[in-house]
Amino acid sequence: METGFSRLQKIACLSGLFSAWAVGYADRILMSIAVIPIAREFSLDAGQAGMLLSAFYVSYAVMQLAGGWLSDRYGSRVVVVSCIVAWSVFTSATSFAWSFASLLAIRFMFGLGEGSFPPASSVTVAEVFPKPERARAKSFLISTVFLGNAAGAGLIGATVAYLGWRGSFHILSAAGFAVALFLWFALRGGIAAQRVHVASRAPQPWGSLFRNPMAWKLTAIWSFTSLLYIGVQSWMPTYLTKTCGIDLKQVGLATMIPNLIAFAGTNVVGLLLDKHGKDHERMFMVLGAFFSAVFLALLITTASLSLVLVYWTLLLLAFNFVYATVFAAPLRHFPEHLIGSTTGLMNFGGQIGGSVAPAAMGALIAASGGSYIAAFCLLLASAVTSAAVGMIWRPTGAPVYAVQPAGTP
């Protein structure tokens, strides 16, 4: 089925979505690194820093279901662009914070602004690309998580010495506004086809989606895996400064390395899923979660910075198997008019897990007198639980259509 977008327009839309995801992820890792000087400036303890990191994920989770429903019902263009504008406003607002309370409120509002973007962007891919091209487009987008994290780490490391943490947020805010403007015009060309596409969609049977055990198991797998991933990404910069004794610039470089390698490795995972994923989805999810736990255990038992970076990189590569497989499943096993809603449900569960991780880890670190062992054990338990749920997951019904790996959450 043609979508009304030319090849050039498709490339422009994909480039815009890729840039938007990269900027969004850059802000998250930027906050994870910026919390170090922020904690010094506002005299925050580990518990308060954890609350600050979690505030975004709480509101971000709330908006997942709304974003999926709105995009399935009305099309994605307005939702996608509005989200980018909203999060750019609050990215800039972060730099004007004057207290812990103001930071907490701003980060909560930031999550509300960005929360509808993940499911909406999945619907955008469905609107812009015909079925045979969608999975390849989504496989490309999935790698933004690592590129954005690497860019965010590099940005804060390079700018904090000259502009401070506040200036770094201004840079990302400007980038967000530029991407929003670009996407508004990139998506405009095929808007008539989008409207026809939306009008032809079947009613959304929310009841049947909520009664589907496959959807809830995918949600659980992603929730526990997100707790692991977001916990590691949120606290690793602080962990490196406290346990390895490196400064903020070195933290930025150290954070970039695993994420850049994982960005490249995503393509390798995509090829494996393309060749073997159709009949091995459960195995990919189980082994991905299991080896994430293995490499995390190795990471927290070594004092060598080089080994920490090796194990962190391997953990991210193992995480890729769960990430890509979970978000390929809706395209394979759910009807087209529920792609956004199903993705929203899974991301809601994932961000609930993500909202718990930073705050819970901060509380455990504070209660342990600065030790990270209990906090990382929480993440280990989460990874093992994800693997256990994956073992009982079974796809129900025949695939809607065959896809390559996908997965922009």
Image: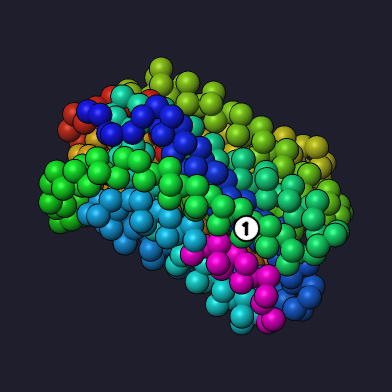
Q: Is residue 195 above or below residue 271?
A: below
Could you tell me which residue is drawn at 18 percent across and 29 percent down?
Answer: 398
Q: Residue placed farthest to the top in the image?
A: 275
324 part of magenta stretch: no
Which three-letter amino acid code belongs to the residue tagged 1? Answer: Ala
Q: Give the range drawn in magenta.
A: 86-99
Q: In the visual, does 227 lie left or right of 64?
A: right
Q: In the visual, does 267 lie left or right of 252?
A: left
Q: Nearer the viewer, residue 339 or 82?
A: 82
Can see residue 144? yes
Residue 146 at x, y = what percent? 60, 41
Prevailing SS of the magenta stretch: helix
Residue 372 at x, y = what percent? 70, 59
89 part of magenta stretch: yes
Q: Which of 250 and 361 is in front in this view?
A: 250
Which quarter of the figure is the N terminus placed in?
top left
Q: Name the residue under label 1.
A: 174
Can see residue 139? no
Residue 215 at x, y = what percent? 27, 47
Could you tell me which residue is drawn at 68 percent across and 57 percent down?
Answer: 171
Q: Nearer the viewer, residue 204 or 268?
A: 204
Q: Is residue 163 above or below residue 252?
A: below
Could you tell me which residue is drawn at 80 percent across and 51 percent down?
Answer: 158
Q: Please tell me whether mark 1 sits on a helix, a strand or a loop.
A: helix
Q: In the visual, does 157 lie left or right of 13?
A: right
Could you tell me which residue is drawn at 60 percent across and 64 percent down?
Answer: 91
Q: Residues within 10 Å of mark 1 (few under 14, many from 20)?
A: some
Q: In the visual, does 278 lie left or right of 47?
A: left
Residue 326 at x, y = what percent? 39, 39
Q: In this view, does 110 lie above or below 292?
A: below
